[in-house]
Amino acid sequence: MSEPGSSLGKDLVGLEGLTSDQILTVLNTAEPFKEISERRIKKVPVLRGKTIVNLFFEASTRTRVSFEFAEKRLSADTVNISSSGSSIVKGETLVDTARNLEAMRIDMVVMRHGSSGAAKFLAERIPSSVINAGDGSHEHPTQALLDMLTIRDHHKKIEGLKICLVGDILHSRVARSNIFGLLTLGAEVAVCGPKTLLPLGIAELGVTVFSRIEEAIQWADVLNVLRLQLERMEGGFLPSLREYNQVWGVSRTRIEQAPKDLLILHPGPMNRGVEIDSDVADGPHAMILQQVTNGVAVRMAVLYLLTGGAPDTAEAAKEGAEV
Amino acid sequence: MYSTCTRAGVRAPTSTDTSGSAAFMMSGRDVLVKRSCLVYLPAPSLCGLYPPVGTVSDQSGGGARRNRAFARSSSLHVSIMDEQAVRRAVARMASELVEQNEGPGNLALMGIQRRGVQIADLIRSEIERAEGVTVPSGSLDITLYRDDLMAIGPLPVVGATVLPEGGVDDRVVVIVDDVLFTGRTVRAALNELMDFGRPARVSLCVLVDRGEREFPIQPNVVGKTITVPPGQSVEVSVPGLDDGWCVELVPLSSEAVRSRQKSSRAEP
């Protein structure tokens, strides 16, 4: 997957295994794409004639809309498929669905799926590029990339920063992608949450574990507050949401204790009053809407990079035959 | 003023190696003279193209990636304009621009990334010096508008596009670039510019016009018009990215020659 340049290869399945060069290539490419969304005509012709299918087997607003804007602003033709209303409810398998789409000559699939590993499974079976928009509790690479871009916008670097992921680590694909990506870029990463919501052996990934939110706030430069995935919690992970908020909630009184200028991220959608209080979410430390804006730029960068190869070899080629 | 740059690293001419003898002739005094010299060389044609002067494939290690510094030290560069000549040309270009547009009032400069930006900056400071007016300026990166983006495979790094303060609407927008060749870059720049608004007029200003257009595009203001011998290319150096101002005739890298042969597609 990692060639001499910083090519992403055919697919973006996860951040695990990517080199820091590859990750930085995406972040650096996202920078000029931010400006396109500020233009009066928010469209460049770079993916003209490419067909992209957004295949969403799980509910999503932000990610799907963000991908769709990114695709449309690069002039790609897009089709959205969600599991309800499609032949998936009739029992068609994932591969059959994808092969049928493939038969209509598509170039890329953006997929969200409830099963971990679904993106890799599909990527190995179809010639089109596959972008993982979240697979089960495995990875959500573009979310982690936009988190990193937002952190870098603010701190001008990632290396050496202390970033703590707070809350439901167990069900969170955002947490895994963040851990892989941030560690690769040289950040210090910690997790903090109730024992029932921390995966066994999480420390083996190279992260610090805090058992109290107050300790995490003392330590961190950035808090990435994760959503409590209530829809995946039928097994009695928590006594009550109110108790969770009392013990783990990111509240104004807690972040006022922070020794540093703390940055608060949240991948959304927020459970206000559960993992994050409204006065923090709407406060000056929160970068939550900035994350959404950056999400479009990062996804444009990923789409753009997956249609080509490594920028640095191209730069040499461009230099070689200028004019 | 016209001089041969670094000779070091070029092999002595042999019966099969024409680059050395070409190199010798390249020390002539005028580009056109140089061209006629080249025409009379024994023609070891590479599908109609002469081998790049000073670049021998075993020397550059086959498909070695082109590196400006490496190329400069190991092959022949013929100077066309030195810093003083560039500054004089840019001063004239600036005054022509102001003259053509009856004053600098409505001008906005847009330099094409990369190297067009530095030339636009120099034009801006010349206008400022002569007229006492600071012209708004910006930059254009045409990467996403290239017509060969899907064909060249690897994608170039995308640079910053910055609009001049106040936008482009109802202004005389001057597109500034280093070298005008096929016209494809300018075509892309025009398309991009149209996505930003409706300029009153668009004008084209280039430091070097080397002819051989593939699109019906004409510059309004030119620093120097030259004819480039086959197998060679024009390279503009600017402070910041390179060592300083100069315009040189350089051998095309073997890689670039190959890619030109493969598809007749020309670089923008």
Image (cartoon, coloured by chain):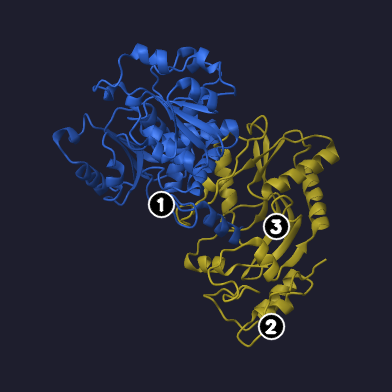
Chain colours: A blue, B yellow
Q: Nearer the viewer, residue A39 or A18?
A: A18
Mark 3 belongs to which subunit?
B
Element on which disc 3 rests: strand
Q: Which amino acid does label 1 sit on?
A: Gly
Note whether residue A159 is visible: yes
Where residue A164 appears, x then y in whole percent? 47, 29
Q: What residue type is labelled 3?
A: Val
Where residue A252 appears, x then y in whole percent? 51, 13
Above or below residue A40? Residue A46 is below
Residue located at (51% from left, 39% from top):
A30
Residue that badge 3 annotates: B236
Is residue B100 rendered to the left or right of residue A116? right
Could you confirm whether marks 1 and 3 are on the same chain? no
Q: Which amino acid does label 2 sit on?
A: Ala
Residue located at (54% from left, 76% from top):
B46
Mark 2 belongs to which subunit?
B
Residue that badge 1 annotates: A9
* Residue ranking furthest to the bottom: B15
Element on which disc 2 rests: loop
